Amino acid sequence: MPGARPPGLSHAGKAHAVSGYGASLIANSDTAVLVALILFVPLLIFFTLRVSAGLRTPLRTIAPWRALPHLSQRSTETGEPVVLWLAGGLQDAAGPEAAALATLYDYVSAQQARADQPAPLRTTHPVALLLAMNSLQGNRERHQLGASQQPDEICFAGPAPLALASAISADLRQGKRTAILLAGSFEAEALWCVASAPLSGAPMLSATADPAGAALTGLTEDPLSGERALPGEDLFSGGAYLHRPLTLGSLLAEDWMRWLLIAIIVIAVLLTSAGYGG
Amino acid sequence: MRRLLPVAVAALAGTVVLLDMVLAPAWLAPLARLLLETSLVLAAAALLFATGHLAVTHGAGIARGEPESGYRSVLLAALLITFGIGVALPGSAALSWVFRYLYTPIQATMLGLMTFVLVDAVYRAGRLGPRGARILIGLALVLLLLQVAASDAISSLLPALRDWMLSVPVTAGARGILLGVALGATAAGLRVLLGIDRPYTVE
Amino acid sequence: MSLCPHCQGENREDAERCIWCGLPLRPDREGNAAGRAPASDTHSEAETSDAWDEDPLAGLAGLLPPVTLPPMPEGSRNAEAEITEQERQDAALFHRIASSPPPLGPPRQPTAPLAAPVPERPWRLTLAVLIVLAALVPIVTGGRLDAAHSPQPGVAAFAAALDALQPGDRVIVAYDYAPSAEAELAPAGQAAVADLATGSVALVALSSRPEGVDIARQSLESLAVDGLPLRYGTDYALLGYLAGDATGLRLAATDLAAAFAQTDAAGTPLERLPILNGLNKAVDADAILVLTDDANVARRWIEQVGARTNAPVLMLTTAAIEPLLIPYADSGQLAALISGAYGNLPSAGASTRPSLYSADGFLALWIVLVLAFVLGLRVTGRRSSERRP
Amino acid sequence: MNGSLAAGFLPDLIGLWVAALLTLAVLSYVIQDNPVFRLTQYLFVGVSAGYAAALAWNHVLAPRIALLLRDPADAWPYAIMLALAALLLGRGWQPTARLAGIPLALLLGVGAAVAIGGVLRGTLVPQMAASIVSLAPIDYGGGLRGWAFALDAAFMLLTTLAVLAAYHYRAGRTGATSLWTRLGRRVGQFGRAMILLVLAALLAGAMLSFFAALRGRFDFIIYDWLGSMRGLGG
């Protein structure tokens, strides 16, 4: 068995016999990445076109995405806002996560703008701040409203993750909330949010890309519930569930890639176990 | 045009950088490097912008006489003084002093404070939490005990069990999550590159 | 009274549909409606709309108890109106219907906040005192458990990777942690850096987060305090803050000078630093040592730099994020991974001054956590048993 | 770190006291939320934001401006970068706010591309390769030990795939009871349970990390602060 190292459990190396297939995959990483992209991009375009032509498909329930529309509606009735706490992990990341967070805020601010209600945001993420300002302005302009409903509707909490904890403590003293949505990459400050949110009497929803934060929010949510947002991938799916049906196409493409990945792994494992691939 | 330009910029810049990472043609490298450096400069500018936004928000709050103005002025003063020292005397002992004796104790103690918050949260979850949260805590306590008591002096099985837990079920589970994140991030990134998601525009 | 087969709610004998869940009570009368799952159980949108596809008013006759007014008493106030058993039951049922909360069909409410925001004050303070005591336990016990503790498997690999470096090799050291992680990362991190410096391995320090720069400076300065004859620019250098997160790391991996605007943290041009002669890219370093408390940062180092170099990537992280990084150690992308809380114990023991950092304290913490958890469970048990009679 | 804390040097001595008082102020929250704790929170937000902004200026923007001023002909790309940065900063002023879309688009486009290239090359492919392990006992030396390792490998494979499958978005038809649907549901449940285990491991780690930070502060209070007082007194 080439590639098989002496068994022995260690963080410093594999305990299990790596297949020759795995080794050649690593050796040809660049090609593998290219193949992945060549598969993914057409799939994504294909499904996006199908969706824009009217394809709709039921999706697995993700609790925060289902609750958010109702909470937004309730908020426009009561005048008590839905607050977003967005954390970015590292301060200046401007990647897919920033786009996902911006989508969430875009949805909430669009809902609130229809009734000229505030859509407060507290974030440690400078790029998310800039994107949120765009959303707020655009959504309010659509209803011929001023740039913002409240002077400090969108607030930067300082770049250190734990600074968010300070900002939300101050924020919670401001008034009643309909709900609090915790989204992004959290670390220790997630625990602070979990502990502070009940003080406002508002339910807390969370969607995080970082499982370390999800472990802490799991102290109040039911991690076994079949509807809780799973840590990681689910954060990126908000748009398709909320107000960007076009992005549904990318979720379907993801599903195809997922099963392709699983199929490749299973076949390679079976071949390896049968003695091929050496 | 006003809408098309940003979409084109995002798509082109992203495609150049991605091609440089995947195919790495030599002729593309200088352009990709230039885009990366521009992006790095813009990230720093975004941080500066956000800090300015923070200062203006709180400054305006103080001017309006909003509640907690006293605290807000402390924040503003701390921000301006720290930034002033940092810009006027970069790398100086004064900036290090601020970092070492103001920043460090508060930040580190805030994290330490989380121990108390955590124990409160564990108590609360035990008392009123959903079933899943209780299972989570129970499992975490078992794993913690394994970490703490993994000693050959007690039994050679304990360290082996700890290592097995971390290197088999936890590793496999974490790997599944990481593969999922990779798929999700790729899809979300492609949406930006293909102009399906356009968070950067005011629409 | 008849019980609904779907939701077990009580209904009048002659009712055709359940007053609670709206589904037919007698499957045989409605043919295909039989066996359909009750909407309130699954909360699936599709099923709910299914259940209401038919005329919602169909079969509603007899759903509510008929209201027949008792005959008005004539003359005598003492004359009791006769109430039949059926009427009594109807009244009770009506009372239950009117006073029960509305059914939680979709949209279901999100998880409600916990009723008690914090434990009752006495419990809270008691637990707080116990935590403080747990932290002080090592003063009394003197770290008895530490010696018996079996080190993490990564520790040996970490030491071996450090030993494998030759004098003159250049290592990139990323100080990517906040001061809060200093207690956990600094002892082992400092030991590793000192070990490298003693072995004449050159250190190129940088940080991809602002706080890291001063931490790096303190760490490198204290090497000089420890008496190592190190020269800036030759034996070590501090490049400074690398903005842009993944973008910054990608740029550093391909062009260090561009990533740092051709100057180090103090503003010295990079070409004047002999340590960087021939080291134009981060991927050309002989090893990469990342000290971090942030899982995203760790992953980006692996993805942007580690994936494109043959040099070993060594990682020292906090216990809070270690489980997320083990897959990378398992796949061989990390040459060694240790987490501060336990990786530190050997080096903490060797420290010259007494430290609270020891396994005894961790065990005490565990006991406090178990106590808090059991206490919470106990209080719940008592409350629900009080309510039961 | 600790070496430079030797009391006697005035700024360090003042600093030591300031740090100790701030530490105690933050810890005072344990007893009750109070104005002093709030003050330290606001102070922290101010200091952290000012510090990070100063570093962004000193280490990223200022050196590039200096290079541009020194040699404008050679360093012209910096002019473009700084102009885009200026556009981004112009987001705060209403007339120029829309122009900030261009630098933001560039930032997100490049960020997305770097993330895609990174996760595919650094996570997806290597982690996929690491999941392809042999399930044949003979590859692990055969015998009881070989079987144990093979079972281990099978369990790992199943876990990884079940967790990955748990993220499947498309919902089957409700009420469908085909074998595949039921199997999919079971696999998803198993995946969720294993995610819970990962979360538990992370929670256990967080418990350790928080406590380590707390003890770091106690170390500081007892050995550095109180210790320095004893040093001064005696």
Image: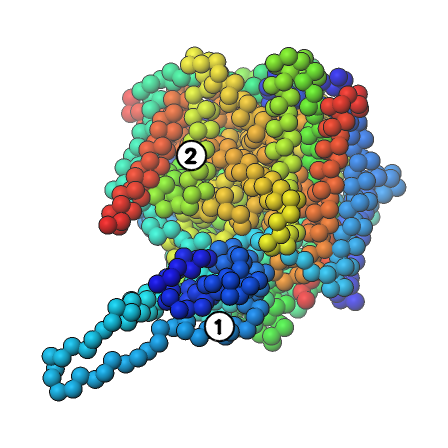
For badge 2, the amino acid type reads Gly
- Whether residue C86 is situated above or below residue C287 in the rendered picture: below
Q: Is residue C22 left or right of residue B11?
A: left
Residue nearest the observer in this picture, D193 or A168: D193
Could you tell me residue B170's position as x and y percent? 56, 31
- Whether residue B70 is situated above or below residue B28 in the rendered picture: below
Q: Which mark is residue B138?
A: 2
Could you tell me residue C374's position as x and y percent? 33, 35
Residue A255 visible at all = yes
Residue nearest the observer in this picture, A192 or C232: A192
Residue occupying image coordinates x 30% and y 32%: C130
In the rendered structure, the residue with mark 2 lies on which chain? B
For label 1, the crowd category at 10 Å Cα-Cα, with few meaning under 14, some 14 to 19 and many 20 or more, is: few
Q: CA distance from mark 1 to mark 2?
A: 50 Å
Q: Which residue is mark 1?
A: C59
For badge 1, the amino acid type reads Gly
- Whether residue C384 is situated above or below residue C4 in the rendered picture: above
Q: Is residue A111 left or right of residue D232?
A: right
Residue occupying image coordinates x 72% and y 33%: A266
Q: Can you name the residue that lies furthest to the front here?
A: C28
Residue A147 visible at all = no
Picture quarter with the N terminus of chain C: bottom left
